[in-house]
Image (cartoon, rainbow, N blue to C red):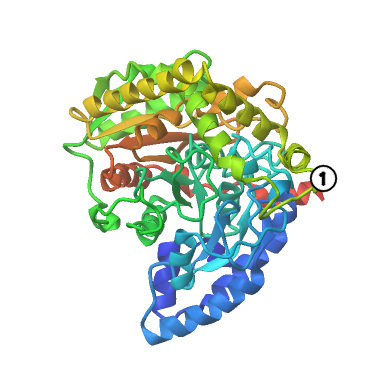
């Protein structure tokens, strides 16, 4: 049954519902894949095979009873920043090593109720702060396309697990690009929903006004399937929105006649890899062949998005991470007095990138600088959102590169945080505006995937998915798998 790892989630659903395979078959195939490649990829901090085994048995019974949900029997990876009651939730940090949550994140609960198969907790940059998954306190995750390259971040484990066929789909979180950028680096689909579309309850917060949970998949259709299964209003999350959840897949098919695709001049920047630029240009040409109207637009404040983000996100992070003091949960290095306990626990529990961002955020919020930095950044954020609102009066979606480069070698940017931050220059604006964005494969450069991004109006994931699906189905990029087995054989 090893061929089951090549099947999409939608195909697995059909096979399961028709009784051609069992959920236990699906699980066995994917656990065998994990055993074969995980030592090279390191996508997971924790493998939850016992949990998945019980879920597979329950899924088979549910299918037999005719009560299966969209994700019943589908192998899923969970970014290790989503709380789970039956496996540790570390957030990639020594500060939470071994921490067991007393409750499930809402998205985890929704999938658990459908008997999805939880294969494991995926590696992440510590507290989701990073663009390469090199800031995990536990391990480096490799890019399945080239094992000495990074998978992107912070949801690098979730992206790599899907790319390496260890799971059908996975969940990550996106604060400034942490779903779309690693999806692009690993050659898979990654979707950041509209802020408020998916509950954030049980997500260990980085920046609460920016964080959003979303799917990774090897096809747009699978991403749509998972998005539908996790969306909706949640009484535990006041920022989640009670808005209708469409049948995303029902809009798929046909050409793009009548669809207006915006292309912004601000996404053509100095320093962008020329091969990425050319692949994206060709992809936009393909959209035109499908009947889309290509409309030049301007997003004049986009150039300030990166600087604005690195004031707002660290400020919110410094407030959110204040709760990690070693008193109630997580690492505790008890000293003679409370202040020394705080200093020792946080000093040794947090890694260097997290400390850097806490200090940036604390500075921006401090007396005398709050108005000069944080308040000004919020004003610029409003202007960025206004640019998008105005653009969407004339276009249906906006097309742009997902990242200015392909994946880079591990360690190549470790000494230069600014170069690392620039990996997210094209993804951050969507977070600032709270709009949906999806990354889809659109080419290769030096054997590494290139990715195209579509952004849409708030709560209009349906159009974003429709355009992405049309592009995907009329190109071959999504059909390629990384040469992972050959790399492992060569290395051994």
Left or right of residue 186, residue 431 in this image: left
Residue located at (72% from left, 40% from top): 346
Residue located at (32% from left, 28% from top): 285
Crowd around label 1: few <14 · some 14–19 · many ≥20 (10 Å): few
Q: Is residue 260 visible?
A: yes
Return the residue nearer the eye: 179 or 212: 212
Expressed as whole percent of the image width and height from the top left, the position of residue 223 reads 41, 53
Above or below: residue 198 compared with residue 48:
above
Q: Is residue 1 visible?
A: no
Q: Quadrant of residue 303?
A: top left
Above or below: residue 154 compared with residue 233:
above
Residue located at (25% from left, 51% from top): 253
Expressed as whole percent of the image width and height from the top left, the position of residue 438 reads 40, 41
Left or right of residue 256, residue 272 in this image: right
Q: Quadrant of residue 228?
A: bottom left
| Residue that label 1 marks | 335
Expressed as whole percent of the image width and height from the top left, the position of residue 476 reads 43, 44
Q: Residue furthest front?
A: 337
Q: Quadrant of residue 69?
A: bottom left
Residue located at (62% from left, 57% from top): 121
Left or right of residue 1, residue 196 in this image: left
Return the residue nearer the eye: 326 or 236: 326
Expressed as whole percent of the image width and height from the top left, the position of residue 320 reads 55, 41
SS at mark 1? Answer: loop
Return the residue nearer the eye: 41 or 368: 368
Above or below: residue 150 compared with residue 382:
below
Return the residue nearer the eye: 156 or 166: 156
Left or right of residue 53, residue 232 in this image: left
Where's the N terminus, which quadrant? bottom right
Question: What is the tally of numbered marks visible in this picture?
Answer: 1
């Amino acid at each position: 049954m090893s061929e089951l790892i090549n099947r999409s989630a939608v195909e697995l659903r059909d096979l399961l519902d028709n009784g051609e395979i069992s959920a236990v078959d699906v699980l066995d195939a994917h656990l065998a894949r994990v055993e074969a490649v995980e030592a090279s990829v390191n996508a997971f901090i924790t493998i939850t095979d016992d949990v998945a085994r019980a879920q597979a048995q329950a899924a088979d019974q549910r299918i037999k009873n005719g009560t299966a949900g969209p994700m019943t029997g589908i192998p899923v990876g969970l970014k290790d920043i989503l709380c789970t009651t039956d496996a540790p939730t570390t957030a990639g940090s020594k500060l939470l090593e071994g921490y067991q949550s007393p409750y499930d994140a809402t998205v985890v609960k929704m999938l658990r109720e459908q008997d999805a198969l939880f294969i494991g907790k995926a590696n992440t940059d510590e507290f989701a702060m990073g663009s390469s998954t090199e800031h995990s306190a536990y391990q480096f995750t490799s890019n399945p396309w080239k094992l000495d390259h990074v998978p992107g971040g912070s949801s690098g484990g979730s992206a790599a697990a899907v790319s390496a066929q260890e799971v059908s789909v996975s969940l990550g979180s996106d604060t400034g690009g942490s779903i779309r950028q690693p999806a692009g680096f690993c050659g898979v689909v990654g979707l950041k929903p509209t802020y408020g579309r998916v509950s954030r309850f049980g997500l260990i917060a980085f920046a609460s006004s920016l964080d959003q949970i979303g799917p990774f998949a090897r096809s747009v259709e699978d991403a749509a399937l998972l998005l539908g299964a996790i969306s909706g209003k949640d009484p535990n999350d006041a920022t989640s929105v009670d808005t209708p959840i469409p049948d995303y897949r029902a809009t798929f098919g046909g050409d793009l006649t009548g669809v207006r695709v915006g292309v912004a001049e601000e996404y053509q920047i100095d320093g962008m890899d020329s091969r990425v630029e050319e692949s994206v240009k060709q992809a936009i040409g393909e959209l035109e062949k499908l009947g889309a109207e290509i409309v030049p637009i301007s997003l004049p404040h986009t150039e300030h998005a990166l600087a604005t983000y690195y004031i707002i996100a660290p400020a919110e992070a410094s407030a959110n991470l204040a709760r990690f003091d070693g008193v109630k949960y997580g690492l505790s290095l008890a000293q003679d007095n409370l202040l020394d306990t705080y200093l020792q626990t946080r000093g040794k529990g947090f890694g260097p990138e997290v400390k850097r961002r806490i200090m940036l955020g604390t500075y921006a919020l401090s007396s005398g600088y709050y108005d000069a930095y944080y308040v000004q950044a919020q004003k610029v954020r409003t202007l960025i959102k206004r640019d998008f609102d105005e653009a969407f009066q004339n276009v249906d979606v906006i097309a742009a590169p997902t990242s200015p480069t392909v994946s880079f070698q591990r360690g190549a940017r470790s000494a230069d945080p600014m170069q690392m931050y620039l990996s997210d220059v094209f993804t951050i604006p969507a977070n600032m505006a709270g709009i949906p964005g999806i990354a889809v494969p659109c080419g290769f450069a030096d054997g590494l995937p290139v990715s195209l991004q579509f952004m849409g109006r708030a709560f209009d994931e349906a159009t974003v998915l429709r355009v992405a699906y049309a592009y995907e189905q009329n190109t071959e990029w999504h059909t390629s798998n990384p040469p992972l087995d050959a790399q492992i054989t060569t290395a051994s």
